[in-house]
Image: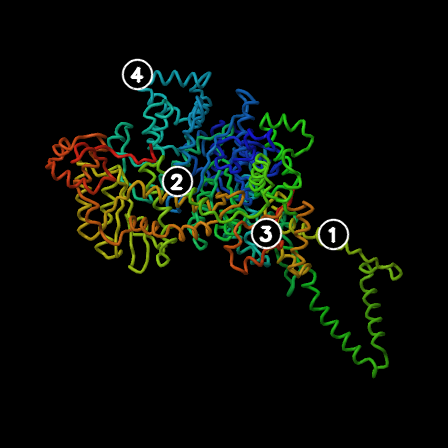
Amino acid sequence: MSIQISAEDRDLLFRAFQQSSQPLTAKKLWDGIGKVSRFKESELHGVLNDLAKEGSLKTHRAQRSVFWLPALEEEAKTKILQALGDERLSKSALENRLKSRLVGWPVQQRENLLTRLVAAKSVYKLPPLKGNYGLYSARPADPREYLDKAFTELARKILRLAENSEPAGFTPERVFAVAEELWRSAFPQAVTAPSAPVIEKKEGEKEKDLNDAIIGRMLQRWPAAAGGALVSVTELRRELDAEIPQKEDFDRRILELAATEKIALHRHDYPANLEPTEREALVTDNHGNFYIGIALRA
Amino acid sequence: MDVIKTLPNPFRSSVVSDPWLPPETDVQSVHQTAFARCCEAIAVVRSRQRATSVLLHGEAGSGKTHLLARLRAHLIAEAKADGPGGVQEAVFISVRLQTSARMIWRHLLRRTVDDLLRREGNNLSQLERLLLHRLGETGLAIGDGRRWLTQKRDESQNQNLLRHLIEPFFERIDVAGRIGYQLRIVLGFLLLGQHRGLAGAWLRGESLPEAELEKLGLAGDAESEEELEERAFRTVIALASLATSELPIIFCFDQIEALQLDGQDRTGLVAFGQMMSALHAESRHVLLISCIQSAFLDTLHRTVRTSDLARISEYAETSLNALTWSEGLKLIRARMEKTPELSALRASAGDALWPLDEAEVKTIFTPTGCTARMLLSYCAELFEAKRSGDQAPPHEPAPAANLFLDQELESRKKKSLEGSVSSQTDQIITHGLPALIQLVRNKWRQSDKRPPPGVDLVFEGPHGRVGLSLCNQQHYPSLSTKLGHLINPLREKQLDRLVVLRDSRLPLGPKARVNRAKRDQLLQHGALWIEPSIESLAVLDALRQLLADANSGEIDNRGHPIGRRTVEDWLLSNLNSDLNDLLEQMLPEEADPHQFSELLEALCELVERHYLVSVGDAAAMLSREEREVIDHLESQTDRIGVLGEPPAVLFRLVPDHAL
């Protein structure tokens, strides 16, 4: 049978939860509100369970059950992302960091939050680079990191064989042809049919793809950009260094995007106050304007 | 173009500096995303009953303050449309952060109270609306709120209504006990319209003499600087707790850049971050909107703690972008349509931008757009050119305008003199003096170590450590406590020099025997006692405001923002000797034997009280010879007005600019 409490007491309960940065046991809650509430301590557990049933609170049932507001989970997820930062951490290293950041959260709930972040692609579970244990990161992995070493080694062997082909009785071309044959048979899903023509994209399409990639990367790396938050040009350029290594090319593309009104550029109002290196790192249009940030237009 | 010769220029007033003023023209589609996010955030506060925040950024002149004005106007319109019993207009608090880290909460409190007590026309003040709303919620105020209030105010003249009404009211609404006894009393006075001036002053955190506190029935405590800051914090939180989901409070923070003394200074921004976190954590029905320049965003991210940043932009972080050509067109047309005569002329012109030329207007647009302020300034020039029949002015960057900056400084000085009150002296000195020292005396810097008790600022330079203590308390026990703390730093040589500053409008009266004795003791130990003139305080105030406005992109010369460095260079090039004189007044190298005397102080205090007094009466009241009084007046005509030759009448001096 559910226990009726007054609107004032309900208000009191929720305020106590709002003011807490961690889940609370019934005892801890009672320590905070016992003196001013109108219901009895013996009734508190029942009240909390009722609130959990109606969905106003979340709970983890254990010997000492804890309760929290659903909104606290968002805060907890933010703390998990902050714990990761820009690093890649093993499960145990992450768990160690979370112990101090998510005080009062049961281990199982911490795991649940992490699982949900992975499902939402806010956190990525990366294959191990070394050993058997995977890593967690707030940024997606690049396959290159995993394959680079193996391919470099393989390429070295193929080239060495090609260099020593003549005394062995075959040509370098034969070496490369066999290598390609072996590649195709190993990864049939990755290869187009030999007779299918490789369609070269027109320059204009390539340009468009790369310009679109700029916006795509903005949204992926800085989700708040979708709402109009400003993204630093220097950070974006660093992020796209592999795809657009030349600053002039990057600046040109950014200015093109601005001209099409897909993005808005924010000028630095006092570029003369900057150090030369800081100023040169900004996007410039060679008319004396230095742009410090990019925002998506609606 | 004769037809428009007599018409006002519709493009003047390109700078919106006050979000309380309704926007001159508003194009809804411009900055619609940012506006929508603010409205959504208000809805979240109303529905989910928790505090949240929005961070807005844009170039100087992009329209941040204009957006706040639009938001306020929207809330008013929404409430009116919904009618009585419907959605209520939110309470609006606008805070320009021209302050220092040490006084950030006191500054916030002062601005909050100023806006809470603001009333427009015959309407209720925001505080009255808040209290009436809460009274209605509790059932203590029945029916029409204004009529009920008028009735209670009439009744309260004859009865001790305060206790019978206010106590049960706060018992019901303040379950968490945030609103202390003294605050309840003061809020009661303000609600019932009693002791408005004094109650407002107390609420702002001003130091009041004991006699005035007695009128309010309050006790004064001798509080240290930290305690004053803590009290300001608790008072702000207590006032914020009056908000409800139906009537939330929106805090709008502007000129955050003004908290930074120079590029390396972190203390102001760190304090801002902490303040925002505290407001967010301790309040429920509150929306915090912060506005910064885009160029400052990186500094904010680097300086403020990550957890504080999250609380500054919890609901949204969004930009106010430069206008596209189509947005610019809408803005120009909207401005011109606002003037009926011009609108009528335009109807027959056939050209969308008449009397302006589209090609000419377009020259100011780059492929990346144009800020609203720059566009309006340029259109203002084009319009003038059309009126006078001149060629359109070519768009060139505005030259560094010495005359312009000179006018800017003068207008700020005039405004400061007009509104000058002794309760603002601490704010002026703590915010302005470090900026002045940095500007003029390169070898000096403000110490970042904690100053000794009683000392407010410490500067380190070639002559050692100079401490400055601001002793502007009107509550004599508080002043006594502070003066008492100052003897130790001198005895223990923690400072090489101590300067004690008291506003010249606050002379120590004849009853201040204890304070006079403590002052004498400090002087014997080598401290300097200075009382800067109202004019020098006004100059310092104007200077700090000019620098703060430049930092925040609000100094605009024909659409082009003038930055802090330009202003600093101009000040050093043009006013170097004046700035040094000003600094010499604030931090003198040696004591001026003629500046301070007990008799002069007593005379100042006498004219403060009596306004006009004959020399004979003054001498009699102070038990001095007339000759002695006249001798003392000869070099002090900037502090006391004198009539007659030889002086026969003394009067209270009011600066020319304040008249």
Of the residues under marks 1 and 3, which one precedes in the sequence?
A: 1
Q: Are marks 4 and 2 on the same chain?
A: yes
Question: Is A285 or A257 nearer to us in this picture?
Answer: A285
| Amino acid on which the number 2 mark rests in the picture | His
Q: Name the residue under label 4.
A: B158
Residue tagged by mark 1? A208
| Mark nearer the viewer, 4 or 1 | 1
Near mark 2 (Cα within 10 A), the count class, few <14, some 14-19 or many ≥20, is many
- Name the element at disc 4: loop
Kind of element beneath mark 2:
helix
- The span from disc 1 to disc 3 (Cα, nearest Å) is 22 Å
Q: Which mark is residue A291?
A: 3
Q: How far apart are marks 1 and 2 (CA)?
A: 51 Å
Q: Which quadrant does the N terminus of chain B fall into? A: top right
Foreground tag (3 vs 4): 3
Q: Answer with the quarter of the image where residue B130 lies.
A: top left
Q: Are marks 3 and 2 on the same chain?
A: no
